[in-house]
């Protein structure tokens, strides 16, 4: 039997609807939530992501500001922009779109974002809080995957979750969140020997490598939950994930599509983190 398709776009829509009252409460308290997005250079994929983030803010009534710096921007210019946003009381969340051009020290830029405004959850203090199981802003994509698993009634505790990919944006925080939820977690990389042997043992398979069609149906355990985080643009302009959807859906129990799966959840969690950051400031006034 073909897998059920997990409607990430629908789950994200429902979340945004539910959050309208949080935005209203903040705005009524004179604290309209504000997100600043900093984009450096002209990576075409980043341009699409940033546009989608800004549009999602507008739809929910979140104030947003987009700062576009040229590809030739200096480290000082980027740090100066972040510093101004750190000090801006109308801004509760700051996102520096990655990747940054080669001349920019990414680690230094991410470390310069105020921890309380780090809605990407990439600051070392927020990543450390994740490792330690302490409260903090969580990276959006893995947080979105956890929410999707929860909403689709997937049991996590005691099950074998396999994460393919070890990036700081997705793979590592994903593994930690699944571990926190008491899964038995295996992390694979694109260089793992006999990858299929590991993926075939996964009750929950999360793939975030950035390689179209890396995971085929024969690498999936019958009935498994398959979460495809990959967003790859093919030569014909179409988007596809890291999972070969046609063959995997014949084997999996449920599967996220690309587009319309994890992508919308990442944006929803970004909005959610921005609301959380704005609410935290309200509580401490
Ligand atoms: N580039 C790809 N994904 C992301 C993300 O979640 N946040 C940021 N800032 N940049 C990204």
Image (cartoon, rainbow, N blue to C red):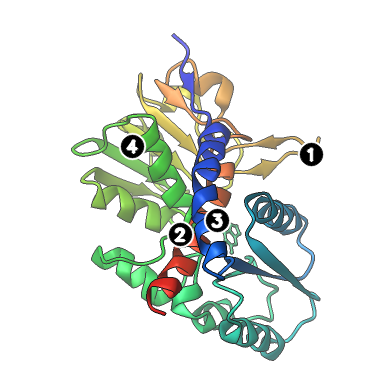
Judge: label 2 CB < 8 Å from ligand 1. Answer: yes
Question: Considering the numbered disc 1 on the image, is that residue within a helix, a strand or a loop?
Answer: loop
Mark 1 or 3, nearer chain start: 3
Whether tag 3 and tag 2 are in contact, CB under 8 A, the answer is no
Q: Which residue is mark 3?
A: 24
Badge 2 local density, few (<14 within 10 Å), some, or many (20+)? many
| Residue position marked by numbered label 2 in the rendering | 139
User: Which residue carries the number 4 mark?
Assistant: 198
Give the Cα distance between marks 4 and 3: 47 Å
* Farthest top residue in view: 1
Q: Residues within 10 Å of mark 3 (few under 14, many from 20)?
A: some
Could you tell me residue 253's position as x and y percent? 39, 20
Residue at the image point whose x is 58% and y is 47% from the top = 210
Q: Left or right of 53: which side holds 144?
A: left
| Residue 285, position as x, y percentages in the image | 42, 80
- Against 98, is 244 above or below? above
The quadrant of the rendered image in which ligand 1 is seen is bottom right
In this view of the protein, which residue sits in the foreground, 131 or 213?
A: 131
Q: Nearer the viewer, mark 3 or mark 2?
A: 3
Q: Which mark is residue 235?
A: 1
Between the residue at mark 4 and the residue at mark 1, the CA separation in whole angstroms equals 30 Å
């Amino acid at each position: 039997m073909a897998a059920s398709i997990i409607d990430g776009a629908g789950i994200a829509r429902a979340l945004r609807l539910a959050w309208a009252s949080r935005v209203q409460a903040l705005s009524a308290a004179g604290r309209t939530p504000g997100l600043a997005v900093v984009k450096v250079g002209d990576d075409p994929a980043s341009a699409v992501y940033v546009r989608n983030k800004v549009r999602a803010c507008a739809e929910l009534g979140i104030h947003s500001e987009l700062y576009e710096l040229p590809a030739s921007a200096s480290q000082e210019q980027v740090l100066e922009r972040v510093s101004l946003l750190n000090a801006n009381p109308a801004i509760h969340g700051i996102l520096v779109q990655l990747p940054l051009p080669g001349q920019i020290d990414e680690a230094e830029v991410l470390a310069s974002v105020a921890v309380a405004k780090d809605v990407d959850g990439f600051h070392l203090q927020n990543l450390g809080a994740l490792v330690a199981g302490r409260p903090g802003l969580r990276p959006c994509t893995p947080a979105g995957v956890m929410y999707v698993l929860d909403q689709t009634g997937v049991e996590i505790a005691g099950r074998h979750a396999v994460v393919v990919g070890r990036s700081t944006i997705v793979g590592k925080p994903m593994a930690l969140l699944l571990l926190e939820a008491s899964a038995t977690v295996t992390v694979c990389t694109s260089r793992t020997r006999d990858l299929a042997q590991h993926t075939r043992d996964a009750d929950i398979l999360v793939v975030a490598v950035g390689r179209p069609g890396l995971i085929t149906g024969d690498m999936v355990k019958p009935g498994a939950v398959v979460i495809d985080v990959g967003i790859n643009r093919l030569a014909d302009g179409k988007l596809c994930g890291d999972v070969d959807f046609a063959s995997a859906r014949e084997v999996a129990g449920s599967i996220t599509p690309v587009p319309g799966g994890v992508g919308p959840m990442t944006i929803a969690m970004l909005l959610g983190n921005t609301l959380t950051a704005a609410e935290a400031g309200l509580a401490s006034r």
